[in-house]
Image (spheres, coloured by chain):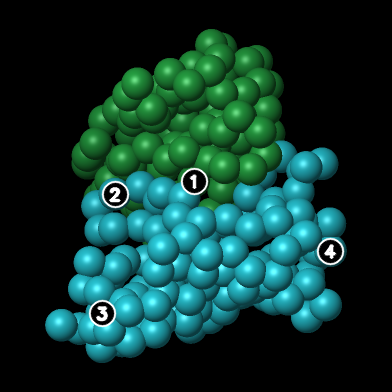
Amino acid sequence: NAGVTQTPKFRVLKTGQSMTLLCAQDMNHEYMYWYRQDPGMGLRLIHYSVGEGTTAKGEVPDGYNVSRLKKQNFLLGLESAAPSQTSVYFCASSRDTYEQYFGPGTRLTVT
Amino acid sequence: QQQVKQSPQSLIVQKGGISIINCAYENTAFDYFPWYQQFPGKGPALLIAIRPDVSEKKEGRFTISFNKSAKQFSLHIMDSQPGDSATYFCAASMASGSRLTFGEGTQLTVNP
């Protein structure tokens, strides 16, 4: 089992560019999450999904969109990147509302 | 109502000492309280978790103490080692919810 994988690991974008982060899990989990982690801010939930075809907003959803077309994949999109979106992004999945398994993270820099 | 407050933000302990990190919550519907450990450049990983029907849970050198009436829980790391140096997050969730609520994190440094 690979667990939770994230693609890419690193990315540098110019302001206004768009990109998609891919999260994949092979544990057949229903729940998937996208977080951003900034120094001193902890883990902040961007969007989450409670099952295939569903998405919901978290604490900091502005500037991001998500899709969960397949149960094993959760995509995070940035339509027009801004420097404020420079962060480390983590995907997580869980079988229920309890233990979450995290991916290794994507470090995004927006210049 | 959904917040989990964590303290301290950072902690420096000598090797062999006890590390203590505290968390407080407001929502009495929370019924699961995990601690996550995160090493630099890695994603957080579950370290230990407790349900509110017990006041303490121990796994090796790591212990969670839970005080339901005070709505507080804490992580104790006994005989702290340099390899324990990491960021620790407390969290809380409930069966009727859909996600974990995380504390702000504590950066622990254990000096040799």
Disc 2 on helix, strand or loop? loop
Q: Is residue B10 left or right of residue B51?
A: left
> What is the distance, in whole Å, between disc 4 and disc 2 at their CAs?
32 Å
Q: Secondary structure at mark 1?
A: strand
Q: How many residues crowd mark 3 within 10 Å: few (<14), some (14–19), many (20+)?
A: many
Q: Which mark is residue B42?
A: 2
> Judging from the image, what is the letter of the chain drawn in green?
A
Residue at screen point 70% across, 56% down: B51
Kindly identify which chain the residue marked by label 1 belongs to.
Answer: A
Instruction: Please give the chain letter of the residue carrying mark 3.
Output: B
Question: Which numbered disc flags the more N-terminal residue, 3 or 2?
Answer: 2
Task: Give coordinates of residue B2: x percent, y percent.
Answer: 74, 61
Gap in angstroms between the C-alphas marked 2 and 1: 14 Å
Identify the colour of chain B in the image: cyan
Q: Earlier in the sequence, mark 4 or mark 2?
A: 4
CA–CA distance in space, label 1 to label 4: 25 Å
Image-quadrant location for residue B85: bottom left
Same chain for mark 1 and mark 3? The answer is no
Give the vertical position of B25 relative to B53 (above or below). Answer: below
Residue A24 lies in quadrant = top left
Pointer 1: what residue? A35
Which residue is located at x 22 percent, y 66 percent? B83
Hey, what amino acid is under mark 4?
A: Thr
